[in-house]
Image (tube, rainbow, N blue to C red):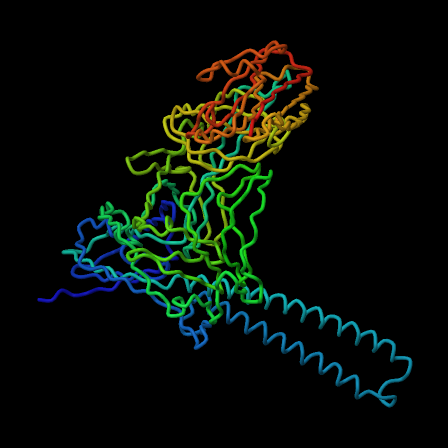
Amino acid sequence: MVALEHTVRVNAPEHAIKAVTVFKFNAEVTRTFSLDLKAGHNKVEIKGLPTSLDSHSVRVTGLGAARLLDVALHSGGTERSLFGQPVHSPEKDSPAVRALRAKKRALESEKSLRGHEANVLVSYATTLSGEHMPPDQIPAFLDCFVQQGRKNILEVAELDEQIDALEEEIKVAAKKEAGLGTHVDITLGVDADTLVELKVVYIVKGAYWTPAYELYATTGEDDQPASKIALHYRARITQNSGEDWAGVVLTLSSGEIGSLFAPGYTTVPELRSRKIMARPQLPKPAWSQSGGGLFGQNLTAGGTGLFGSSNNPPQASGGFFGQSTQPQHSFGVFGSSATHSAPAGNLFGSATAQSTSSSAPESGLFQSRQDSAPDGQLPTTGGLFGSAITPQESQPQPVADSGSDNFEVIPSPGADFSEPTTTVTESPLALSYTVAEGAPTSIPSDNLPHQVGVMVLQFETNVTYVATPRARPQLYLQAKVKNTTEHRLLAGPVRVFLDGGFISATNIPNISAGDTFSCTLGVDSGAILTYSRTAHTTPDTTRAFSETYNTTTYKVRLRLRNTHSFALSPLVIRDALPTVDNEDKRVKVVLRQPSGLLDAVGGALANVDGQPGINVRWTEVKDKKGGVDDGHYEWVGSEYILKLLKLKSSEKSDFN
């Protein structure tokens, strides 16, 4: 016996969304429906779901005594004209849109009626003459005519405003309904009449969130920044899924769901073999045998370029400081002769060794020349704009792996919060917070960022005065904060407020639990910093028949004036020395001041002569940057009442 099928129709927008979990690029929506099911088969038709819904993500739970027999998803599309414009179908309008259109038609009819009223008034006035109205009654009639006309104009203008507002309301409602063209048919089987709380979960696109922070600092009685700060965690949520999230329990997750929209995205990538293959030999053009150009012109040493410029080799000329350079030929973009020196001189006239050499002329873009090459080798060819491609550049290159690493590690925010309504849950894949569980959140589908408060973190901080005058002569207040929470902080922008006023904006990186991060509080306007650097070059005239050396002495002077009534402590001023490639023996850099820096090892502090309370050291190496290898050093002042500070450094560079 075939079981009877009962149909239950549900309009999703009429039922509130229970919960939403927002991921990096999409969101998971949870809806619940209370349904009275009859014995047998029940077909539940849920309409008005968003078109951004992923067809493979629908999940049905909360069946109770019912059995899930089938789930079918239907996506309704918007009809479009030949040119891609949406075509309006009145029969597909929802009752709400039909009611709005009916109200608009009523207003348009009333406006038309007011137009007839004005026409009747004018027509009546034109029929009057001296036979119908004495002259003493004409002023009273005209006053009545003008008053009635003004009233008609105002009423028509008000009707126009109402019609325009209705048109905009209809447009918004129609657009919203166009994004709710998906419906799901769920077939359930029950043995007896029962009531179930059906839960439908699905994934929608067009939703994401990013972390943001607001750092609040205060100044103490000594006018210095206090040691405690408050870090307000915010979430900027943007969604245009097509349905408004009104009064939902909102959960933010640092993870992502990729397999639903891109199958195989989360699978372990396959390791592929890598092979090195030689490039195939290119056939020689017929015109290259005779040495002719692209249009048949001869490219011999005595020939001319494409526009008549001479290809004769120029005479050898001196280098930058008189060193002889041997010319090689190449042809420019339009056949003009270009000379390449081998070896070529650098800025100070020293020779630059070439890895390969060739006596064959290179070629330009419009006047190519390819001399015959030995068997098994590619001929030397010109680059796109006449730059030569050497035989070394034509060697076989390894084939790069086309696979890309799409995995991104997303750390998680801290949970040492003062708002108990936020619940933090951590898993091996992601970290999630349920925001304001006792106070539901509303996020409309308007594609605009909405900021939601997550938690407030209290941290202890140490403020340091830091300057990098070579880049910018300003003194910054930098707060060093330790993440004392049990979770990680996501990277994001930070707006800094001091005593309630906005002072600067910065960013923080991903911070693990127990790690520290630095946050710039702003520029100290009470510190005046000046920076000057001079250079003096002395040529070596004692070597007449050998390589000459030029000695350049650089002097750096820093002047810091403190107009505060308190000490700028701790104080860090950073600078950098020029460095030289270890393989280049022609250049040597000698540090003269501060002399104590030469003996400082591993970040140890060295005294500065004539500056009590000021030390110098190499900077800390971070991500293989900084420290002695990069020539980065810093002056450090601690427990020193600084009113006027002068720092000097100098280095000598020898060049041949």
Disc count in the image? 0
Taking the view exactly as shown, the residue that stands out farthest to the left is 1
Which one is in front, 55 or 557?
Answer: 557
Q: Residue at x 52, y 16 (%)?
A: 597
Percent across and percent down for residue 193 are 19, 56
Which one is in front, 600 or 106?
Answer: 600
Q: Residue at x 69, y 24 (%)?
A: 528
Asked if residue 468 lies left or right of residue 53, the reply is right
Percent across and percent down for residue 448 are 50, 51
Is 170 drawn above or below residue 507 in the view shown? below
Residue 166 seen in this snapshot: yes
Asked if residue 626 lies left or right of residue 35, the reply is right
Quarter of the figure with the C terminus? top right
Q: Residue at x 59, y 76 (%)?
A: 109
Q: Which quadrant of the figure has residue 150? A: bottom right
Percent across and percent down for residue 115 are 67, 78
Percent across and percent down for residue 169 are 53, 63
Quarter of the figure with the N terminus? bottom left
Residue 656 seen in this snapshot: no
Asked if residue 484 lies left or right of residue 494, the reply is left
Which one is in front, 351 or 159?
Answer: 351
Is 415 drawn above or below residue 610 in the view shown? below
Taking the view exactly as shown, the residue that stands out farthest to the bottom is 131
Asked if residue 336 lies left or right of residue 517, the reply is right
Q: Residue at x 25, y 56 (%)?
A: 36
